[in-house]
């Protein structure tokens, strides 16, 4: 399976993580996919690849936001 297919499959997955370790794994997987697609994008400049990277980045940001949690108030 190519990196692009893995990225599309990752976006179609449901994002219900039961624990923190699953969130960390998903965040790392998203980062690896983004970097892999970026290498392909550098060679052919396909706008579809840029859109895929943007979508993966949004999902990654949501996962990381959930990992950080809410700030404590005093």
Image (cartoon, rainbow, N blue to C red):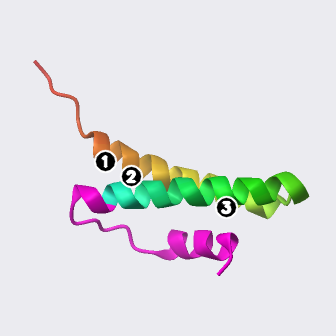
Residue identifier under label 1: 66
Point 77% across, 63% down: residue: 48
Mark 1 vs mark 3: which is more N-terminal? Answer: 3
State the residue in front, 51 or 27. 27
Distance, label 1 to label 2, CA atoms, is 5 Å
Tag 3, which secondary structure? helix
Residue identifier under label 2: 63
Of the 4 image quadrants, the one containing the N terminus is bottom right
Tag 1, which secondary structure? helix
Q: Residue 52, labelled with which disc?
A: 3
Q: Is residue 16 magenta?
A: yes
Residue farthest to the top, as pictured: 74
Circle 3 packing at 10 Å, graded few (<14), some (14-19), many (20+), is some
| Position in image of residue 72 (x %, y %) | 16, 27
Point 45% across, 75% down: residue: 13
Residue farthest to the right, as pictured: 44
Q: Is residue 4 left or right of residue 55?
A: right
The answer to whether the residues at label 1 and label 2 have Cβ atoms under 8 Å apart is yes
| Position in image of residue 22 (x %, y %) | 30, 63
Circle 2 packing at 10 Å, graded few (<14), some (14-19), many (20+), is some
Q: Quadrant of residue 16?
A: bottom left
| Position in image of residue 73 (x %, y %) | 14, 23
**Segment tinted magenta in the rendering:** 1-22
């Amino acid at each position: 399976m190519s990196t692009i297919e893995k990225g599309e499959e990752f976006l179609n997955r449901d994002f219900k993580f039961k624990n923190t370790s699953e969130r960390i794994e998903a965040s790392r997987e998203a980062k690896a996919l983004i970097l892999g697609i970026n290498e392909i994008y550098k060679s052919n400049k396909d706008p579809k690849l840029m859109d895929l990277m943007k979508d993966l980045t949004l999902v990654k940001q949501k996962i990381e936001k959930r990992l950080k949690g809410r700030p404590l108030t005093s």
